[in-house]
Amino acid sequence: MMMKKLRWPLLIVLLAAVAIGVLLIGQQPAVLQPDGGDGGGVPVVQPATGGVYAEGLVGAFSRLNPVLDYVNAVDRDIDRLLFSGLVRFDDRGLPVGDLADSWGISRDGLIYNFSIRQNAVWHDGQPVTSDDVIFTIGLLLDEQSPAPADLKELWSQVEVVRLDDKTLQFRLPEAYTPFLDYLSFGVLPAHLLGDRTFDEIVADPFNLAPVGSGPYRFDHLIVEDGQVKGVVLAVFTSYYGKKPFVEQIAFRYYPDSLAAYAAYQEGDITGLGEVTSDILSPVLEEDKLNLYTGRLPEMTMIVLNLDNPQAPFFQDASVRRALLMGLNRQWMVDRLLGGQAILADGPIFPGTWAYYDGIERIGYDADQALALLKAAGYTLTTEGGDIRVKDGIPLDFELLFPDDESHAALAEAIQRDWSLLGVGVTLKAVPYDELVSDYLNGRVHQAALIDLNLSQSHDPDPYPFWHQAQMTGGQNYSMWNDRQASEYLEQARVTVDLAERVRLYRNFQVRFIQELPALPLFYPVYSYAVSVDVQGVTMGPLFEPSDRFDTISGWFLLAKRTAGPTAAPEIIIPTGTP
């Protein structure tokens, strides 16, 4: 099939770098207090426009350009506020209009028509048009573009038709429902960059003073000793959507989290873009900081090669279930990850529209795990033996893991838990690139501890990792050859009806937990901290760290307080004032 959405590369990430394991901690906005119906006396507090929010980012300034920011997360944080896409996604992964005020999809899923908002304008006042979208797609397709390979592959097969200034059409060669996932890219102004080559755009001054169409416009750079130390944005008063209350946002760059936290203590910033494990404890003790946490689109799991002749026992689903049941995953999260993850129960992320809340949850139960192994015929051959055996084949295999301290601790805990079941595990640390290229791609692994990273992939589409067709040359590293599961995945990626997709993914998740081609361990979380003076901040599950700004239009630093409908004129007050 076309458009297999490879989502490459598979990333091995350090779970120790994320923050506290809570799905959602939110600071609620100021409450409108009723006056009791008598028209006076009781204060009413409402958000007011004004104030400056300053956030510390770990990293360095490169270029403010959504076509170039794929390799620099801190650029993407700022671009999120400067630029708009045709669509964006809510915290459940459902598409909502951004530059587009409406769209339609043909019944066969081959044609998508989009209408751009009439009041969508660039920060210089020029209208946003279909030409801007088409121009940006052309840049993404350029051979010099750092855009992911799957994005380039898709757009190379899509016909883009300009219908008029504000409408355009996309024609797909075959139905592919996750297509909307590819329409959230930040759009660039053709009237400013359309006469430049890609190489010229890379070096263009535009990247230092960009013009976008998002809720904030570029104001100025903070330059110290000839180096860019920060970026200041101002609210865009002609923004087509809900205009933010916070008048200015200042971002400042720091080399690491400790430096950013020190800057907060000095009063230079009022928020930390990420709270990593090395500053989590002191941040939790700060009574003037609120901590917000959301699940990341990542999953740590153990991939079992079901087709490796040296580990034939992996073909037995009851053995795979016993292996998962024998892992004390909560202990790992609490003791090794500092509570900075959530137990995983399947390949689709909780909190999203495709997640099936009724999925079976397999908890830690060493006694039941032992019973499953015994029922499957695995016994200790001699009294005091360490490894269980069936038909002369010992339940013994090699577990690969990334060669870093965090994964080593996890691998050792897994080895200890399984040894209590009579399962022998030999640990082998492997550099990331070697683990992927020499073992996973070559399908020569027996078992591997990996972290699957699906950042910026709002549509769940598990096809690339679990469909039969991906056993050869794809990312089905478990070599799971299950026709029933594959049919669910095939139908779900060509079905336009959302309710039907929900049903298909529910069935897939039930099948997955029955068969367990891989052992899901946990989902890491992301945390950031904001001054208690900033009200209205909320955060749900994330698809990338910049999603923390999804609710930026509701944040506020100032409030209007009155004594009721018959009161004197409004008084503007900081939200932290009693």
Image (cartoon, grey):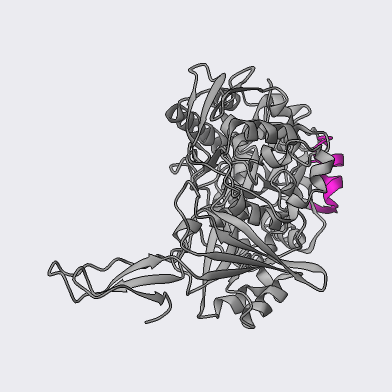
The magenta segment is 426-445
Q: In the image, 547: left or right of 398?
A: left
Left or right of 47 in this view: 151: right
Against 110, residue 525 (above or below) is below
Among the 4 quarters of the image, the one containing residue 274: bottom right
Q: Position of residue 344 (x, y in %)?
A: 57, 50
Q: Position of residue 10 (x, y in %)?
A: 74, 43
Q: Residue furthest front?
A: 125
Q: Is residue 162 above or below residue 356?
A: above
Q: Pick the residue in front: 452 or 72.
A: 72
**Residue most extreme to the left:** 38
Q: Quadrant of residue 208?
A: bottom right
Q: In this view, does 172 lie to the left or right of 357?
A: right
Residue nearest the viewer, comparing 435 with 145: 145
Quick check: 507 above or below 124?
above
Q: Position of residue 397 (x, y in %)?
A: 78, 45
Name which residue lies at 48% across and 58% down: 244
Q: Quadrant of residue 26?
A: bottom left
Point out the image quarter for the N terminus: top right
Residue 326 visible at all: no
Q: Does the segment drawn in magenta span residue 409?
A: no
Instruction: Pinpoint residue 56: horizontal percent, then vertical percent.
Output: 65, 69
Instruction: State the residue in front, 510 or 491.
Output: 491
Residue 137 visible at all: yes
Q: Is residue 365 above or below residue 460?
A: below
Does the segment drawn in magenta span residue 430?
A: yes
Q: How many labels does the image show?
A: 0
Which image quarter holds the C terminus? Answer: bottom left
Residue at 60% across, 63% down? 340
